[in-house]
Image (tube, grey):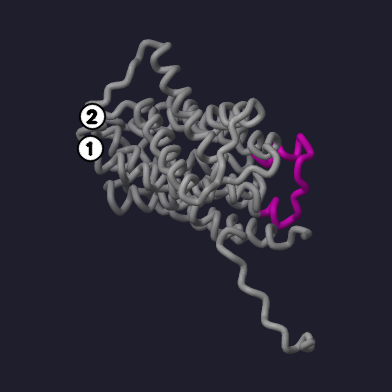
């Protein structure tokens, strides 16, 4: 038997076991939702239609992946309840709110709303005694929150391009609606962990929750008499395809991040998404931001770094 000094070095951690890489991948794909959502609004695609296309498209794409990789998607009452509740709370409600708010606040400011979900998630998790948080974790959450507050306070420094044409300032009503986004996201983060069904794979849960979200959106729209106007979406297949691909890539690793990192760490994908949303809005959509906004973004990055350090110090 070879001595320990001659044993091969441990293999590097795989991507699917690395919380930081999962966080960056998930947050980056989520961040693309904001500029694409703004473009969809400009194209005249209704928020409920766009939210439906995200859930239905992602669910179908991931269903094909599950079929090709022979991963079963369980169908019973236990899983059905999880699919339905997680899909409504985590995707349907936040997505409709996001695409309602973007035309009023712009892609950049809407993306900042996601940065409030970690502090709300943390409060719920601590209240329910679901997870212990060490000093680095608390510092990371607090740092990210301060960065988010700086960005929101800087809304008065946003250039004209940051808001829709004709909007001189952020309307308090729409800002209030926007704050419902992180509350729904936080509730979804906690529920998905609290009610996680056994040994289900992340891919199976992504398929079930997305298809349930799509079904809920379709039924709700019909019940409320809104219907779906497919014309604008059919006129922009490029936008639809880009959004479905981005969302499918995100959901492919979303549940794995939740399993590896837990609800609080996962919630910080909002920090990454906000940075991507700000950058994309600046580079591609002509949105401009003041120095305080970019300073806040740097503080957010520091918060993610501290939280990642806390994640690595968790007991095995």
Left or right, 3 with reference to 283 = right
Q: Is residue 243 above or below residue 187?
A: below
* Category of crowding for the residue at label 2, using alpha-carbon neighbours closer than 10 angstroms: few (below 14), some (14–19), many (at least 20): some
Residue segment shown in magenta:
121-139
> Which residue lies under the disc numbered 1?
236
> Is residue 220 something that shows in the picture?
yes
Q: Quadrant of the N terminus?
A: bottom right
> Which residue lies under the disc numbered 2?
232
Q: Is residue 156 above or below residue 75?
A: below
SS at badge 2:
helix
Q: Which mark identifies residue 200?
A: none
Residue 107, located in which quarter of the rendered image?
Answer: top left
Left or right, 160 with reference to 253 = left
For the residue pair 7 and 217, the one nearer the viewer reads as 7
From the top left corner, tell me how far across and down residue 199 is, in percent.
68, 44
Residue 129 is covered by the magenta coloring: yes
Magenta segment main secondary structure: helix
- Residue drawn 74% across and 58% down? 314
From the top left corner, tell me how far across and down residue 310 is, in percent.
69, 58
- Residue drawn 41% across and 54% down? 291
From the top left corner, tell me how far across and down residue 121 is, in percent.
65, 39
> Is residue 157 something that shows in the picture?
no
Residue 103, located in which quarter of the rendered image?
Answer: top left
Q: Is residue 136 above or below residue 32?
A: below
For the residue pair 222 and 67, the one nearer the viewer reads as 67
Residue 232, located in which quarter of the rendered image?
Answer: top left
Q: Quadrant of the C terminus?
A: bottom right
For the residue pair 231 and 155, the one nearer the viewer reads as 231
- Residue drawn 38% across and 42% down? 34
How many tags in the picture? 2
C-beta proximity under 8 Å, tags 1 and 2: yes
Residue at mark 1 to residue at mark 2: CA–CA distance: 7 Å
């Amino acid at each position: 038997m070879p001595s320990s000094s001659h044993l091969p070095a441990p293999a590097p951690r795989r991507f699917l076991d690395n919380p930081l890489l999962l966080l960056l991948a998930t947050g980056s794909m989520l961040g693309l939702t904001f500029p694409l959502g703004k473009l969809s609004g400009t194209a005249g695609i209704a928020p409920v239609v766009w939210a439906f296309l995200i859930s239905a498209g992602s669910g179908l794409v991931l269903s094909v992946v599950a079929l090709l990789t022979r991963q079963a998607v369980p169908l019973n009452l236990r899983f059905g309840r999880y699919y339905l509740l997680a899909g409504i709370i985590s995707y349907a409600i936040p997505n409709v709110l996001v695409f309602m708010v973007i035309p009023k606040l712009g892609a950049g400011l809407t993306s900042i709303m996601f940065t409030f979900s970690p502090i709300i998630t943390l409060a719920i998790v601590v209240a329910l005694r679901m997870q212990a948080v060490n000093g680095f974790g608390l510092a990371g959450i607090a740092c990210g929150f301060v960065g988010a507050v700086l960005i929101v306070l800087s809304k008065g420094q946003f250039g004209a391009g940051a808001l829709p044409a004709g909007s001189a300032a952020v309307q308090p009503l729409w800002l209030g609606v926007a704050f419902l986004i992180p509350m729904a996201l936080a509730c979804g983060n906690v529920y998905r962990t609290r009610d996680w069904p056994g040994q289900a794979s992340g891919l199976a849960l992504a398929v079930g929750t997305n298809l349930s979200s799509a079904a809920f959106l379709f039924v709700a729209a019909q019940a409320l008499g809104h219907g779906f106007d497919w014309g604008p979406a059919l006129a922009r297949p490029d936008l639809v395809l880009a959004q479905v691909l981005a969302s499918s890539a995100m959901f492919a690793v979303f549940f794995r991040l939740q399993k590896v990192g837990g609800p609080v760490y996962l919630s910080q994908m909002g920090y990454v998404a906000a940075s991507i949303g700000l950058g994309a809005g600046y580079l591609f959509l002509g949105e401009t931001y003041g120095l305080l906004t970019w300073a806040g973004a740097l503080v957010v990055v520091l918060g993610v770094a501290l939280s990642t350090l806390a994640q690595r110090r968790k007991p095995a």
